[in-house]
Image (cartoon, coloured by chain):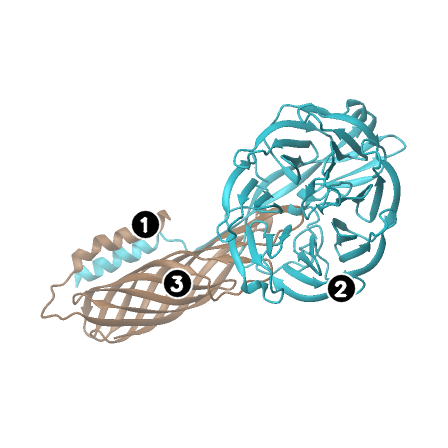
Chain colours: A cyan, B brown
């Protein structure tokens, strides 16, 4: 028995080395802002400068024009990439544009935002981009990556916020699984990477063959002789009859928290925090609101194919409390859009339709491909899922899939949607 | 981590010292089903806002295995741990080793290790729980030769990873939960 007692003694002594304290640590990646003041006059005088290609750090929106890719570096400018060979995209230049978030291309003219202005750039020689003209004072304020800026027109000073990131580690009680009230009021969350209220880019396929293609997160659209831009509450029209010299045409009030614009046929579909606005754009100089499809407060990129609109709603964004879901909306009657069905998603962002395939970015949960032949059974027809990437917005061009996320820019061959083949990846030097 | 490695090492070192010779023995199925409580404490917060509180959760598990010799059995464990914010389903491999007996009682040691899944846990909106590794060494006392009532005292470590909804100005938020509990169980073996 002595052996038994000896063993028990040793085991119990061993137990005393163990801790019976739960150890739970919450890690937070937090954005911090620092106020800075800039001179609007100084920015304009410095002009737009083309520099040598550089690595991506905080990529924003994506735009495609023929063999060239334009990837926004948030508030810094645009990477121009030669994509003649999608398996080996080559960065050829970086255009330094202070306060830039969006872009659109018609012919050889690249339209970009630069804080308050819209600038027309000649990209005939992508290695030496030159400024052609500028529409001044179109915007008064905006958001970039969670940093808010506003201009004082009297003094010409831009009050901006410089954004940085820190990692915090907090000891928790292991039990905080309750969603705090208003947690979705993370105005400046991941989505803000792509949200700049004074920005532009061309959403969807526009009317002219000389136009480029933007993603579903775009805030600009090209149609006829107009460039349409949405800011937080308005739809702005710029006349680009002379592409190199855009003229402000007019502003149409829409609503609050406007986020995206998607042109389709003779209509404009505008995504906002409260719903999707449908405009009749038969007369491109005078878009008329036909209807609004309202939903819970959420962010909602939109894509359209024939009589169906696909809208993603997500939480934790520039909007507030919301579900994470894909809504399919019947727009056969544009004056009376009807919800056909909602599908729960994890954290949906941008999307692209290449009927019958729907490509849907799930943020940190990757990219999903669905067959949408039957809009009532989309969830039963998920073709594939790439989970190990971070996907915010996607563009399909032919069998090629272009995808941007916080960890890099990806290109896939989607000829076989069950097995997307990675063609190339341009990594981000410092993700987030 | 270091603490439980030392503990397991101590147990392994003591096993030969108390091993008993097997007599005419035939391998057979064994079952050891238990339920009990997971006791622990947790300290949260920083500085003046630091708070320590006690934690109690319920646990249940069943061990199904083979008695390899009169002292040693090996088996597989399926269980359920009701932590306040996570329902964990551990699937593990385990062993039971008899240390000795006195009268109608017998003393044994146990070691279970495996993975705790969150299959049956329903996350709140915005949360995404994923399971993690589990280890559970301990000692026990049984009444009867092989069949009968058992009481065990053990230590359990269970890891759970939780992706959380982001708050104001956050881009990512997640939590690593390491539940480290003293476990008291009562059960039956046959």
Q: Assign a secondary structure to mark 3.
A: strand
Q: Which chain is disc 2 placed on?
A: A
Do the CB atoms of the residues marked 2 and 1 lie less than 8 Å apart?
no
Do the CB atoms of the residues marked 2 and 3 lie less than 8 Å apart?
no
Mark 3 or 1, nearer chain start: 1
Q: Assign a secondary structure to mark 1.
A: helix
Q: Assign a secondary structure to mark 2.
A: loop
Q: Quadrant of residue B188?
A: bottom left
Q: Looking at the picture, does residue B69 appear above or below residue A182?
A: below
> Measured from the top left, where is residue A236 in percent x and y?
84, 44
Q: Quadrant of residue A312?
A: bottom right
Q: Looking at the picture, does residue A150 appear above or below residue A305?
A: above
Residue lying at 75% horizontally and 41% vertically, measured from the top left: A200
> Measured from the top left, where is residue A291 in percent x and y?
81, 60
Residue closer to the observer: A223 or A349: A223
Q: Residue furthest left?
A: B24
Numbered badge on residue A326? none
* Left or right for A306, reference A6: right
Q: Residue furthest front?
A: A209
Q: Quadrant of the C terminus of chain B?
A: bottom left
Q: Which residue is mark 1?
A: B5
- Which circle, 2 or 1, is nearer the viewer? 2
Q: Residues within 10 Å of mark 3 (few under 14, many from 20)?
A: many
Q: Which residue is mark 2?
A: A337
Q: Which residue is mark 3?
A: B90
- Residue A335 visible in rendering: yes
Residue lying at 63% horizontally and 53% vertically, measured from the top left: A353
- Which circle, 2 or 3, is nearer the viewer? 2
The Cα–Cα distance between marks 2 and 3, rounded to whole angstroms, is: 48 Å
Q: Residues within 10 Å of mark 1 (few under 14, many from 20)?
A: few
- Residue A349 visible in rendering: no
* Left or right for A372, reference B32: right
């Amino acid at each position: 028995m002595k052996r038994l007692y000896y063993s028990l003694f040793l085991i119990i002594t061993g137990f005393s080395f163990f801790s019976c304290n739960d150890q739970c640590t919450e890690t937070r990646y937090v954005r911090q802002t620092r106020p800075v003041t800039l001179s609007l006059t100084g920015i304009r005088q410095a002009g737009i400068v083309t520099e040598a290609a550089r690595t991506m750090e905080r990529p924003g929106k994506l735009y495609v024009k023929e063999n060239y890719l334009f990837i926004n570096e948030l508030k810094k400018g645009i990477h121009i990439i030669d994509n003649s060979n999608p398996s080996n995209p080559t960065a050829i230049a970086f255009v330094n544009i202070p306060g830039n978030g969006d872009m659109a291309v018609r012919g050889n003219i690249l339209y970009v935002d630069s804080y308050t202005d819209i600038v027309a750039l000649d990209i005939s020689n992508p290695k030496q981009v030159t400024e052609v003209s500028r529409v001044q004072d179109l915007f008064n304020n905006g958001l970039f990556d969670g940093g808010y800026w506003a201009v004082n027109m009297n003094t010409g000073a831009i009050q901006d916020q410089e954004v940085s990131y820190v990692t915090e580690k907090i000891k928790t009680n292991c039990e905080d699984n309750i969603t705090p009230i208003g947690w979705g009021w993370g105005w400046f969350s991941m989505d803000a990477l792509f949200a700049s209220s004074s920005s532009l880019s061309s959403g969807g396929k526009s009317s002219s063959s000389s136009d480029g293609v933007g993603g579903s997160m775009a805030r600009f659209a090209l149609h006829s002789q107009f460039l349409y831009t949405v800011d937080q509450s308005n739809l702005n029209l710029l006349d680009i009859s002379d592409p190199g010299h855009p003229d402000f045409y007019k502003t149409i009030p829409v609503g609050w928290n406007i986020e995206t614009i998607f042109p389709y046929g003779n209509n404009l579909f505008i995504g906002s925090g409260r719903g999707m606005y449908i405009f009749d754009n038969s007369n491109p100089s005078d878009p008329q609101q036909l209807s609004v499809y309202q939903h819970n407060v959420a962010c909602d990129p939109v894509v359209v194919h024939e009589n169906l609109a696909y809208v993603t709603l997500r939480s934790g964004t520039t909007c507030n409390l919301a579900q994470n879901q894909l809504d399919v909306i019947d727009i056969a009657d544009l004056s009376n859009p009807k919800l056909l069905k909602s599908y729960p998603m994890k954290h949906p962002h941008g999307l692209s339709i290449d009927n019958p395939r729907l490509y849907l970015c799930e943020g940190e949960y990757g990219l999903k491909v669905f067959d949408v032949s039957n809009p009532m059974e989309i969830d039963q027809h998920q073709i594939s899922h790439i989970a190990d990437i971070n996907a915010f917005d996607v563009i399909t061009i032919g069998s090629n899939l272009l995808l941007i996320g916080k960890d890099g820019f990806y290109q896939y061959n989607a000829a076989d949607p069950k097995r997307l083949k990675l063609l190339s990846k341009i990594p981000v030097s410092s993700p987030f | 981590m270091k603490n439980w490695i030392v503990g397991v090492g101590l147990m392994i070192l003591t096993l030969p010292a108390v091993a008993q010779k097997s007599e005419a023995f035939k391998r057979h199925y064994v079952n050891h089903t238990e339920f009990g409580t997971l006791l622990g404490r947790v300290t949260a917060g920083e500085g003046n806002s630091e708070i320590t509180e006690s934690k109690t959760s319920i646990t249940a598990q069943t061990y199904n295995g083979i008695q390899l010799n009169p002292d040693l059995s090996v088996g597989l464990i399926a269980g359920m741990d009701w932590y306040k914010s996570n329902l964990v389903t551990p699937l593990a491999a385990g062993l039971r080793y008899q240390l000795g007996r006195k009268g109608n009682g017998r003393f044994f040691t146990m070691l279970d290790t495996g993975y705790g899944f969150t299959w049956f846990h329903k996350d709140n909106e915005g949360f995404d729980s994923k399971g993690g590794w589990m280890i559970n060494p301990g000692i026990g006392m049984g009444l009867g030769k092989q069949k009968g009532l058992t009481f065990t005292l053990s230590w359990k470590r269970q890891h759970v990873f939780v992706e959380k909804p982001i708050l104001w100005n956050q881009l990512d938020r997640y939590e690593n939960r390491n539940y480290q509990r003293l476990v008291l169980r009562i059960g039956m073996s046959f």
